Amino acid sequence: MGQAVNPFLSLPEALYRLLFKRSYRQAFLEGNHQFLDLSEWDLQQLRTIDHEELQATAKNICRNLLSGNLDTNGGLLQAYPSVFQELKNLQINSIELMYEFMETSFFDDYREVPFGGEGICVEEAFYYFLKNYSPFIKANPYNKLMLTHEFLTSLLSILVINKDPHFVVKTDQVICNGKVFYAVQYFPSQIVAALVNRPVEMQEQAESEIPFLYAATEKTLIKGPIDELTIEMIRLGEYKAIERAEVSLCERFAVSQQDLQRIQNKLAMLGLIG
């Protein structure tokens, strides 16, 4: 015979939900105990919790997500400055947004501590949440581009500092070529010009899309407009692989071997290839 399944939450699970899930906390505070999935014994233990202190602690968790604390980085406000400015323009309250974020499966995928099990960082979890948050995404066609730019900037910046992160990188936008983690995103040329704060020195038409690189090298984050040849060389990742593809690359991109070698040397100097 199979082992009976316990229909109730464990006490640690219930405590987690009380702190991080507003709907569960509200049910507890309003006395709707039938929605808590608790045994009578555990419910008796939780009745000793001070309601005001519980709500204050939950709000403090939201503030820490936004602004960070002594044990984490600078928080989501630092990772997504332009995004939060736009949310403010849309009159979306940041604390309320955190309560909504913590209710989602995107937040559930986040792990704050190394021993908490495999999970993604909060910056990536928030990216997935906001990408699906209609009041932000539908307010402006460029909001999704802004979100993506600040997500890749923050994630690759973390990977510069933290060479052995306790979290996993879920997005397939970020690639490892054996030397660095990097991502390439295509933006309209006017967006790229705004990101680099200068005219883009490329021959594309104004409405065209330009590839934009984000790369976490040993020492720094490198980001900026890039061309298709350089993307392919970074993808190959090392001198030997580029040398084997030299003839094909020169033909495909109409460059000389000398120009290819010059670009290769520069990529190596920047730490983008091995």
Image (cartoon, rainbow, N blue to C red):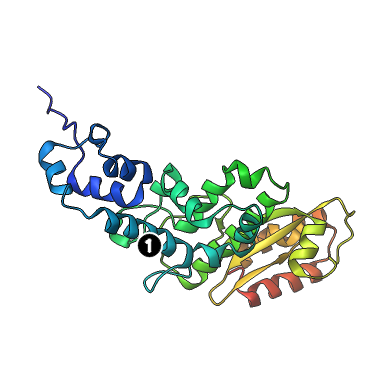
The C terminus, quarter of image: bottom right
Query: Can residue 105 be seen by looking at this rendering?
Result: yes
Residue 136, x across and y down, in percent = 63, 47
Residue drawn where x is 63% and y is 67% of the image: 239
Residue drawn where x is 70% and y is 70% of the image: 264
In the image, what residue type sits under mark 1? Asn
Residue 131, x across and y down, in percent = 58, 46
SS class, disc 1: helix
Residue on which the image places disc 1? 60
Residue 58 location, quadrant: bottom left
**Placement of 188 over or under 258, stated as above or below:** above
Query: Can residue 180 be seen by looking at this rendering?
Result: no
In the rendered structure, the answer to whether residue 111 lies left or right of residue 206 reads: left
**Placement of 222 over or under 119, stated as above or below:** below
Q: Residue furthest top?
A: 1
Residue drawn where x is 52% and y is 71% of the image: 160
Residue 167, x across and y down, in percent = 40, 58
Residue 116 location, quadrant: bottom left
Residue 129, x across and y down, in percent = 52, 47
Instruction: Compare residues 172 and 38 and report the one nearer the observer.
Output: 38
Residue drawn where x is 88% and y is 56% of the image: 204
Instruction: Compare residues 270 and 206 and report the one nearer the observer.
Output: 206
The total number of labels drawn is 1
Instruction: Compare residues 149 and 87 and report the one nearer the observer.
Output: 87
